Amino acid sequence: MQKICFSTQIIRHFESKLSDTIEVYQERIQWLTENSKKAFGLIKGARVSILIDVSAISSGPQKEEFQKDLMSLIDEQLSHKEELFVLSFGTNARSLWPDPMEVSSSTLQELKLWVKTLQPDGGSNLLQALKKIFTLKGLDSLVAIMRSCPDQPSEILSDYIQQSTMGRDLIIHFITYRCDDQMPPAVLKNLAEAVRGYYHCYSPKMEHYTSRDMDELLAEIQKAQSLLSHVQALQHSSPCEALTCTMEEISTEITNGPLISLLPKPPKHDAPLTIEFPNLDKTSAEWLKVNGLKAKKLSLYQVLAPNAFSPVEEFVPILQKTVSSTIHEKAMIQFEWHDGTVKNIHVDPPFLYKYQKQLSRAMRMYERRIEWLSLASRRIWGTVCEKRVVVLLDISATNSMYIIHIQHSLRLLLEEQLSNKDCFNLIAFGSTIESWRPEMVPVSHNNLQSAWRWALNLRCWGSRNVLSALRKAVEVDFKDKDKHQSQGIYLFTGGIPDQDMVGRPRPGCPLSFATSSVFPQVDTLPRFLQHDF
């Protein structure tokens, strides 16, 4: 009874913490909707460039309100920055200063006077304004305050911004002020997300405002409220029936002997395997041989090679002397080549633009590969590409609480990556070793199901005798290792072994070693056991 009351106190404490967290988030949202932050959001960065769309500025109360909000932005946020550069744009772009200026009382006063002189100017040529901004150096934040939809499509703007900011650490803010129906918030949000920037939409008529900061906070509040409702339901169940039942089960298991897993079983944990055929069977090294930058001829030297010319030095008979070629600085630049020589390089902007597009596509392909490697069994085991595989499972006593995780990880491997192999075996090790079969057997549907049923009966005990498991795998399962070229040992363990693993595989031994940890934080495993990820 004492344990149950203590757990109830924990739940009440957790409920209180969740309520406090939600309150903090709500206070943060309230702070984000005050003064200039309501109209323009929270401006990040220390050296800021401001682009102000003047295409929709009109005389009267609306113009005065816009100027008032800009004054508030200057006093509350821009006054705390280090450098400022401001530019208004309509059909043409006009800057207040030729270069970024240090923030001081005089520059802020000059900026306020400039804001009062803003006049409407035709269209909304955002692209021209961006071209002028990207020629400046040292800025770390770009803020575009939009009053209407820009003249250029968002796809063109997004593409240009990505190309121009490649290699630069630049925070980008897109703000719509009183755009109403001229620029739907979804368009701005998609543009900001495409360039990995921030967005803020404000309409004083409807008192409507939204931003990336607020959306992230609202998402966290929703998660916290959902969790809070579950906690409250658990606390108010009559009389804490679910909690009482759980604590009794834990107390019974602890009292009855060795501690077994307290993790909940995944759905259909004890059911037969649902075996799949692997859809890809290449290591990352093999995959990169086909899809890497060098394979696709996208490395820097490969791309520049057609436009790289060696300096020429020849004897000119009419001059009776040796003459060296020279270059015009506006036509070519000198570039150190990979062999240490100097080449004269000429590259047209369209060529560079095409190269940047190709690099962007390659980066997206690599990101998809990394995402694919992070899913399902590959997240735990990597890509199992060898045709003959032995899996070593750590069932030492310290892994007792994680036996469900060990079994589930093995299930994913059996279902997703072993059906196209030639032979396999499973070896479980604690103080001693226990193998599923005396030696490797061919992969078949029946053998995979049999291996899974065997794994369901594993129990954790003893120490961690990794050496015996490795010796069994190498000396028995791979006794004819020299006859095969594609073999792998996969070690799934929860900590350091009993023995000092300082050895290396013998030269000429065609085996691949990989290791995965029951605990993500473990980093003391043998260094020659590497995971393909």
Image (cartoon, rainbow, N blue to C red):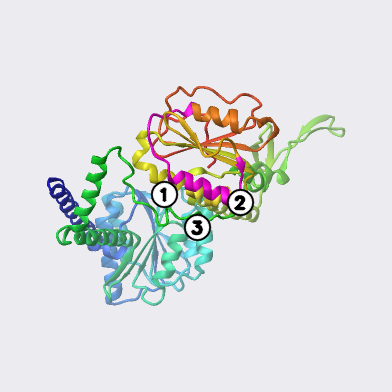
* Residue under the point 26% across and 51% down: 105
- The residue to which callout 1 is attached is 139
What is the magenta range?
A: 441-467
Q: Distance between the residues labelled 1 and 2?
A: 45 Å
Residue receiving disc 3: 161
Return the residue nearer the eye: 398 or 125: 398
The vertical placement of 185 against 258, above or below, is: below
Q: On the image, which quarter does residue 486 sit in?
A: top right
Question: In front: mark 1 or mark 2?
Answer: 2
The secondary element bearing badge 3 is classed as: helix
Specify the quadrant of the image occupied by residue 312.
Answer: top right
- Asked which quadrant contains residue 69, the reply is bottom left
Residue farthest to the right? 317
Tag 1 and tag 2, C-beta contact below 8 Å? no
Residue 120 horizontal/vertical position (percent): 39, 72
Marks 3 and 2, Cα distance to the nearest angstrom? 36 Å
Q: What residue type is labelled 1?
A: Leu
- Name the one closer to the observer, 245 or 492: 245
The nearer-to-camera label among 1 and 3 is: 3
Label 1 vs 3, first from the N-terminus: 1
Q: Name the residue under label 2.
A: 280
**Residue 410 x %, y %:** 48, 45
511 horizontally vs 176: left or right: right
Q: Label 1: how many residues lie within 10 Å, few (<14), some (14-19) or many (20+)?
A: many
Q: Distance between the residues labelled 1 and 3?
A: 15 Å
